[in-house]
Image: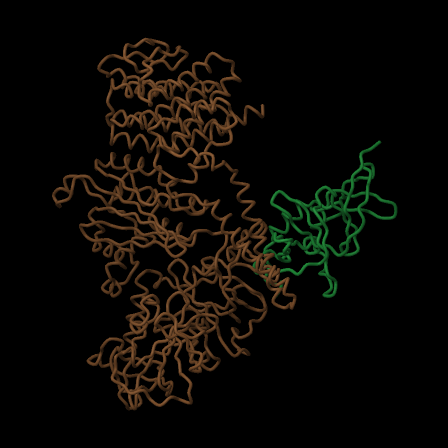
Amino acid sequence: MAASQQFCTFMLHEEFFGVPVQQVQEVIRYQEMTRVPLGSEMVSGLINLRGQIVTAIDLRRCLGMPARGARQLPMNVVVRTGDGPVSLLVDDIGDVIEVDEDALEAPPETLHGPTRVMVRSVYKLPGQLLLELDIARAIAVAEAAKESPLSRA
Amino acid sequence: MDDCDEIVREFLVESHENLDRLDRELVELEKQPSNREILASIFRTIHTIKGTSGFLSFSKLEAVTHVGESLLAHLRDGHLSLNPERTTALLALVDAVRQMLAAIQGTGQDGDADHSELVADLTRLQQASLASAPEGDGAAVGRADTKPAQSQQGAPPLPEAVSGPPEEKKKRKKKKTEADAQAASGARQECEAKPEKGAEAQAEVVTADKTGAEERVRERASAEQSPAEHAASASEAKPEDAHPHEAMRESIRVDVGLLDKLMNLVGELVLARNQILQFTRTTEETNLVTTGQRLNLISTELQEGVMKTRMQPIGSVWSRLPRTVRDVALSCGKRVRIEMEGQETELDKTLIEAIKDPMTHLVRNAVDHGIERAEQRQAAGKGPEGLLKLRAYHEGGQVNIEISDDGAGLDLKKVVEKALQKGLIGTDQAARLSDREAANLIFLPGLSTAEKVTNVSGRGVGMDVVKTNIERIGGTVDVQSIAGKGTTVKVKIPLTLAIVPALIVTAAGQRFAIPQVSLLELVGLEREEARKQVELIRGAPVYRLRGSLLPLVRLHEVLKIGEGGGASAGGKCERVNIVVLQADGQRFGLLVDEISDTEEIVVKPLGKHLKDTSVFAGATIMGDGKVALILDVLGLAQHARVAHEGRDHPAAEAESRQACEESCASGRQALLLFQYGAGGRMAIDLAAVARLEEFSPNSLEIAGDQETVQYRGQIMPLVRVPAALDTRHEPAPAQEGFLQVVVVHASQGRNVGLVVDRILDIVDESYRLDRQTARHGVLGSAVIQRRITDVVDVASLIAAAQPALCPGASVS
């Protein structure tokens, strides 16, 4: 009997992602954000999480996906990290699902770009694939990215 | 294993505290070698460390402390007297112990450092005794005199005269406890070790004359648990110690992490309260309103209370300084006495940490450079011993620390020369410097005390670093020096950093908080004025603030956020708001769209992900629950490259004043003209004017013997100009019953209203000031609009009417 793991799943640009449920502190609706000028462009801003100031990272930008439509408000998946909670902005939140380790496979060689770095493994579910996001790497990518001259002109 | 770690950790914490005390006590002892109480306390401390390290099998530590203890025993018994050599050796022992403790902390072992030299030294020093006294270990237990000195190690208690002095009784008691400990198993020893520590801690609390919180919270919890403690305290309770034992029970040791957490929670509570209060303003529900008010009061009190728990007496930083002074003085062959006043002055823990290094540096400097050698002092008619005085006190929500020496004072000529040489100031500026400004040149980076580098102070930490460090925590530093009399360095720091007053501004729709410490003044310009007064130098906007150029920075441009409203060149907005800021000696104006209120904000750190952005000092949560970023003024200035180097020194003020006077004397200047009496005319420099207002006579209120009005949520004192100038003048007929008031800036963000009879005009004119008619409050007269007009000296006018608001140089 292979071990199984629970994932908190979410959608990003029609793709199905998940993070281990143990790392998730909570999922909250869209929160008004305060933008941080001159910061990393992948950091969408700061939210007030019950008095705590939490950085919100836009996963779409991290993964190099097109920006969300203006009407489409992201959800916050707040994850625990060594440096306190961080909010990951996602399009839509899915169920918590349990997957067998059996269904795990390394990301295919053909994946490239930021996805290659940030997807830890792929789970083969019936009818769709679940991409496990490497939270630490996603945050590292967001940190490293500096505002490019083109953005937010 | 965990238990063991726990014990080691406790041992470390305690030993560190004890060592700090040892430093102080040894220096103290050197001054009064016959003080048995101090000696006994030192002995106890070393003894405790030895005992515990033996039990925890740190053999090296034990060996070193053992020789030290033996030497101390001789001293205590009067076989030896304390001389500088012995003191130095004992201090070296303290250093060695400290080093080993650090090693234990790091590796769990007492380190590989070789201390045999020290051991030999200490042994040699006890050999020099009159009677070659025996070593500690079990030897010569039965000395004939009544002093139980030699018998620490496993020797049975001596049959002593029961009527010995209380001091001895205590020792005997201790010795007994220890003898038990030696006999018993390890576990038992550990248990015994505690009461001893407890007893000691208590002795410390009650004998040493300090009231520090750190001291108060020491070593309660563990001591109380042990039954033997009661015996120990009982033995302490001798009549000469008429000290309140309650002092002991009133304090407990609390983990700092817990306090930090509490502080955070209170911060959040304050925010929640702000939100609720905002909500109650829009509701009719009286119950909610009253509950809100109560919540307000309670949380304010709670906030104060929790802040207090984080307060530490400054004495905890100072406790090491006597040792520093002694060492430095010895190495430069000087004699220096240190006096401390206000050790109990409390400030926030984080600030205590932050001022440690600057304090040490300033003290070293004072001893090394400030105080002269004994010969020189005597030649100058002073006592051979120099005096270094530390003084701390609270004043106006700030902590003031003064470090003064009675040395030769700064050689201002040399300082100015040096600054000139290094090109830090120009010749013309140098000529204009006041003594105080010249003294403050020592804080300039690059102006090292190079001509007199010694091994003590030439350590690369210049005075500029002291200044930077102090400014980083929102403080200021100032030096005053009187030739031949001495130098005083005055440091002012805020009480706490966690909650600070800040000005809230808006740029491109986003709110930002600017800590009030870096705020100098606010300038509001109407659109027309702005068009004229904000000039461009190759595209870089500048503003003439009282005659000197103030570089302007558009906040939204620096931050690269959207289009600013009024601050942008187009200027759709009615007003242009300039926030005049000071950072690291640079002055610059920040153009923002809107200036809101000042608020007490709770500073929260930014996540690691944003640490690189030096422009922000943190973030805070506003009353409406939204997050606002706190601007780091220094970082912002650097980011915007406010190139203002020529001015970033203390002479800037003088220069600007001078420049202003010059422009008053000849150049074109915008002036506000008003009439007094029937036909007299007066002019005020328009740059000093904030606004023109009219007040109904009904709104006049009397506070003290001062006429005041309520203005923008503040109480604004009014000064009747002609009256204040002592001018013979018949009041002009009231203008439609309204008072015409010229609002001018005073210090600390306050305004003062100058009541004039009638405002005539604003002119931009060049004129020649004739100073013959200068008198109090009047700079002189000039011909303006072909009429003789007195030019008002606003600063002295305010000073005369309102000494408390005297703005110094901020209004010219």
Q: Colour of chain B?
A: brown
Left or right: B493 with respect to A96?
left
Q: Is residue B220 above or below residue B631?
A: above
Which image quadrant is residue B96 in? Answer: top left
Which part of the image, by quadrant, shows the C terminus of chain B? Answer: bottom left
Image location of residue B531, percent across then percent down: 46, 80
In the displayed structure, does residue A83 sit left or right of residue B658?
Answer: right
Foreground of the two, B788 or B507: B788
Colour given to chain A in the rendered image: green
The image quadrant of residue B699 is bottom left
Q: Is residue A38 above or below residue B243?
A: below
In the depicted view, which residue is nearer to us: B441 or A42?
B441
Q: Residue at x 68, y 59 (%)?
A: A31
x%, y% of residue B462? 33, 47
Which one is in front, B574 or B547? B574
Q: Quadrant of residue B673?
A: bottom left
Q: Quadrant of the N terminus of chain B?
A: top right
Number of labelled discs? 0
Q: Position of residue B203 (x, y in %)?
A: 38, 29
Would you say B303 lies left or right of A90 here?
left
Judge whether B119 appears above or below B485 on screen.
Answer: above
Q: x, y percentage for residue B645? A: 37, 62
Task: Identify which residue is drawn at 11% across, 43% down.
Answer: B379
Instruction: Establish if B176 lies above or below B557.
Output: above
